[in-house]
Structure formats: structure tokens, C-alpha cells
Amino acid sequence: MTKAIMIQGTGSNVGKSMLVAGLCRAAVRRGLSVAPFKPQNMSNNAAVTSDGGEIGRAQALQALACKVPLTVHMNPVLLKPESDVGSQVVVQGKRLTTVKAREYAKLKPQLMESVLESFNLLKSQHDLVIVEGAGSPAEVNLRAGDIANMGFAQASETPVILAGDIDRGGVIAQIVGTQAVIDAKDAALIQGFLVNKFRGDPSLFDDGYAMIEDKTGWKGFGVLPYFGEAWKLPAEDALDIHGSRTDGEFHIVCLGLSRIANFDDLDPLAQEPDVRLTMLRAGQPIPGDTDLVIIPGSKSTRGDLAFLKEQGWDIDLHAHLRRGGKILGICGGYQMLGQSISDPEGIEGPAGETVGLGLLDVETLMTADKRLTETNAVHAASGQSFSGYEIHIGRTKGKDCTRPFATVDGRKEGATSADAAVMGSYLHGMFSDDGFRRAFLASLGAKAGNVSYAQTVETTLDELADHIEAHLDVDGILGAAR
């Protein structure tokens, strides 16, 4: 009979996604058929699945750790924030609606059916399902109608391991406090705890660890030191993106948009030995030594275009081009580079039209249909073939489309300015293709290394599993599954 175990956290960003990925790989190495599952995720960093939908990028990494194809059932509810108060709701890979926070609270109970359907489907196909919670079960004000943490655990009768983050401080209060505020019935589902992201000698926390065990009565499954190689894995949060090198000769700057989406495009670039990658924060100017500016995808293209202009980056981009720099816009970033973005139906926000950056002679019309597909393409400038994916709304046309960025099945894709300094494309994931990444960097004068991105991720997942095996009671954690 298929078993399941759920990793919940004392808060957001305590390392749940990485823990699940490492546990998945550890379980697979025990000869088990394993699947990851997250009932509800909130992220604009999505992956296209083999069954034609989209899920959170963290679950895509976990599926890779499990060595199984992506399916929409690994993340049946995906919330994609479009504003400070509203999100697009994706259910089993397809857009259902866009709602504000209060409206979503009323919608959640209706989504439990889809969540349990997906969970039970995965259980029917695998030996073990490792579930990731969202946020924290200590948010008891959100317990009614919950589908992400204890509401799901109760409905599916899945046991829970609680993870605390010592790196942010107060881990004793995090774990003990969680037990203090949650319902006794929910607390009974928790089989034990673990402490994540410890820096230094873990034995220094022996007294604190024993205190948590004493005050909660829960079993401790170990203290996990900080995993220093985590940067080599696809980042779940844009704030986690950084280059490993500060001395790379070729400087790539990515504009840190407020609704940045699918920023995993940057991860492979961070590993190139000649590349120095900077994620630009609000209020920071584009550095004068920048060789390439990437304008990434966005979940709210017109809103993020306004954000870009508020930072003065539109002025900086013109200065960057005068210095001989290059610009690449991907998806929403491509749309921003054009003359205008029109959204007459208000699909991404208030209906209307916004003047673009005017750096490409193209115009974009937002349409209700969403393109979700894996894609094979040929780079027009180098002739290099590559694979990627599309995940966007909107159609872009104009004079510069006659100079495409790539071709897809003979169809022109993207656009390039007459001087080839400004490029735009809807294709995500292109830099994960080693051959294309090398050809693209070489075309811009950068030294391309011999990095195999896919192999680096695979090796790092094995190293993560080794790290977890060395410091946590993995047999105990997996043995708690039922």
C-alpha cells in the first residue's frame, strides 16, 4: 500500500523544497518509486509539464530528484500573484480564475476535491509520495478551509515532519510555538521535527535540541547543516539567485522586476566561469560595465513595465545601448521592449494600453488563450538548435519580427533590432541547453565554459541526498510514512 509523508515548515523559506528534493533522491536510491506533491504553491516560477499544464518550479526539481516525468498532479493548485492583492488560480495545470485574497478564502474548500484527486492518483502510481507544505501550520487564522498544510494532512491522513530554520534565529520558539498554537488534533499528526540550515558545529545546539524534544514530546530527526551547494540547483525564489563568481569578465545584469516570473532562465548562466551575474534590486542603477541586460518574464507585464520605469531603468537601458551593450527580453520582458502592450479585456490587470520601451518595432496584444508547450527551436543568429518552453499569454507582431530571434518548425519566433543590439523571445529555458548557451555567449564575445548544466544539477541532487543522509535520520523519516 502506497505511503506518504509530509514536510511542513515553521514558516516560509525554511528550506522545505530543498528538504523534499533531497529526501526524494534518498528514497529513490533505496529502490522506491517516488513522487513529489505540493497541494498548493504560490509562485510565478512555473514549469511546463509533459501532460500540457504548469506546476511550480520547485516541484519540477523534486520530480527530477525522483527521476519521473512532470505532471500537473504534483502541484494541483498553483497561485500566480498578479498584484499585491490578487492571484491567478491554476488548477491541475490550467487557469481557473483570477481572485483577490478574500475571494480565494471562499474558493479553497472547493479546491480540496482536486487536491485529493491528484494526490490519490500519484499514490496509485508510486510506492511513496513526499508532500511539501506551504507557509506554516502556525498560521491558525488560515486553518479554516486549509488545503496546504494541516487541512490537507487531516483530509488525506498523512503524517507530518515539522522543519524549523535555525539560520533566521529563534528556532526553539518556532517549533515549540507551533505546537502551542495549533489544534491538538493537528499536533497529533506531527511525528517529529528537524532543524535546518545550521552553520558551524551542530553539537553546540545539543541543549536546544533536547529542550525542543522535552517541551513538545516530539521525536527529533536531526540537525541539518547549511548546504553550501544549493546555489547550483534551480532557485525557487528570485532573491536566492546569485552568481557563484564575482570576478567573471562578462557581466550579465537581470532586472529584478516586482512580479518576476520563470527566473530559472538565469540559473545556468550563474554557473558559467566567465559570467558575473547580478540580480538588480529596486533603486539600483544598471552598472556601467554591464555587457548584457536581461529583462525577464513577468506575471504582470504592464505593471512591471511601470515598475521598471519607476526605477529609472528605461533611461539606464538607453545609456547601456549607447555604450555598446546588448539587451535580451524574455517573454514579458520581450513584450516590454516593444512600442505598446494592449490589454483590452483586462486579463493581467486593469484594461488599457501601455506605451512600451520602444526598443523593438513590435506591438503586443494580450489575449485570453495561454500558450503552454515544450519547444524545439533554432537560434537565427548562430544556427544552433536548442530546446525550451513557452508559457505566456499575448501575441506580438511587428516589423522587427521579420528578423526573428529563432525559428520554431519553420515559423519565425521573437524579434531582433536592425543593429542586433536588442533581442526578444518568448522561449524560456534556452540557457539550460548547453550548446545554445555556449553559442549565445560566444556570439556576444564571452568565453563559454564546458559546463553541463543538467549534469551539474544531477550531481548536486546526489550531493544533497548524501548531505541529508549524513545528518538526518532518513530511515526514521521515511519509516514515519503511512
Image: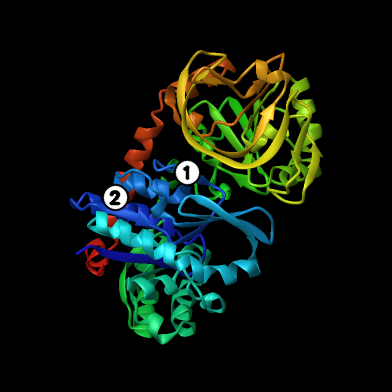
Q: Name the mark nearer the viewer: 1 or 2.
A: 1
Q: Nearer the viewer, residue 18 or 372?
A: 372
Residue 261: where, in percent of width, then height? Answer: 59, 44
Kindly indicate whether the residue at mark 2 contacts the one at mark 1 (C-beta within 8 angstroms): no
Q: Residue at x 44, y 58 (%)?
A: 15
The reply to whether residue 201 is in sight is: no
How packed mark 2 is, by other alpha carbons closer than 10 Å (few <14, some 14-19, many 20 or more), is many
Vertical position of residue 193 compared to residue 228: above or below: below
Q: Nearer the viewer, residue 427 or 110?
A: 110
Residue 194: where, in percent of width, then height? Answer: 36, 68
Q: How many marks?
A: 2
| Quadrant of image for the N terminus | bottom left
Vertical position of residue 14 compared to residue 311: above or below: below
Q: Amino acid at mark 1?
A: Ala
Residue 43: where, in percent of width, then height? Answer: 55, 53
Which of pointers 1 and 2 lies earlier in the amino acid sequence? 2
